[in-house]
Image (spheres, grey):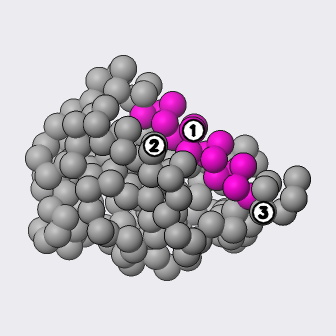
Amino acid sequence: MIAAPIPHDEDKRLQALRALLILDTPPEERFNRITAFAAFEFDVPIVLLSLIDDDRQWCKSTFGTDFCSSSRDISFCGHAILQDQIMVIEDAAQDVRFHDNPLVIGEPHIRFYAGAQLVLPTGEAVGSFCLIDRKPRTLDENDLSILSTLRQMVVTELVANRDKSIGQ
């Protein structure tokens, strides 16, 4: 297993994440609707709206799992926030970064992962909106476009939450 490197702008990224005032808050219907839609649209058993804090991955919304938090060291999303494009792992069991990851060899037995980084308008990648399957699979260009649109919907909601919380 290869842990994701720390982004060069980690302090600024963490500051932007915490300014969203969303970490450790209860689930919300507006986010749950998006994760549920993605699960049905892509026919995947698990969807996560994952935020990457300094030492953990925390999920604001999940579909198909009770998974809520894990160490950042083992998170796929820690890798996804470093990518310029959607990170697609067609078969994690065959990927050198993940083949021996506890999330691959144990619950939830990830084989397929597609993570679209959640980038705020100010440029910080604070998390990932991701699709997970227990079997290998691929995405086509249309799928990537839909996932990108859902990612942007999530970012819009995250920013709206922040702006509402600070009274803008």
Write down the residue under mark 3. Answer: 165
- Name the residue type under label 3: Ser
Q: Earlier in the sequence, mark 2 or mark 1?
A: 2
Q: Nearer the viewer, mark 2 or mark 1?
A: 2
Write down the residue under mark 2. Answer: 34
| Circles 3 and 2: CB atoms closer than 8 Å | no
Relative vertical location of residue 114 with respect to residue 79 in this rendering, above or below: above
> Which residue sits at x=37%, y=75%?
70
The image quadrant that residue 140 belongs to is top left
| Circles 2 and 1: CB atoms closer than 8 Å | yes
> Which residue sits at x=51%, y=40%?
151
**148 on left or right of 168:** left
**40 on left or right of 59:** left
Q: Residue furthest top?
A: 142
- Inspect the magenta stretch and tell me whether residue 12 lies in it: no
**Quick one: 95 or 154, which is closer to the camera?**
154
Q: CA distance from mark 2 to mark 1?
A: 8 Å
> Which residue sits at x=49%, y=79%?
55
Helix, strand or loop at disc 2? helix
Q: Earlier in the sequence, mark 1 or mark 3?
A: 1
- Inspect the magenta stretch and tell me whether residue 148 lies in it: yes
Where is residue 158? Give x, y as percent: 64, 52
Q: CA distance from mark 1 to mark 3?
A: 18 Å
Q: Residue furthest right?
A: 168
Write down the residue under mark 1. Answer: 153
Give the magenta range.
147-162
Q: How many marks?
A: 3
**46 on left or right of 117:** left
Q: Residues within 10 Å of mark 1 (few under 14, many from 20)?
A: some
Q: Nearer the viewer, mark 1 or mark 3?
A: 3
Relative vertical location of residue 32 with respect to residue 15 in this rendering, above or below: above
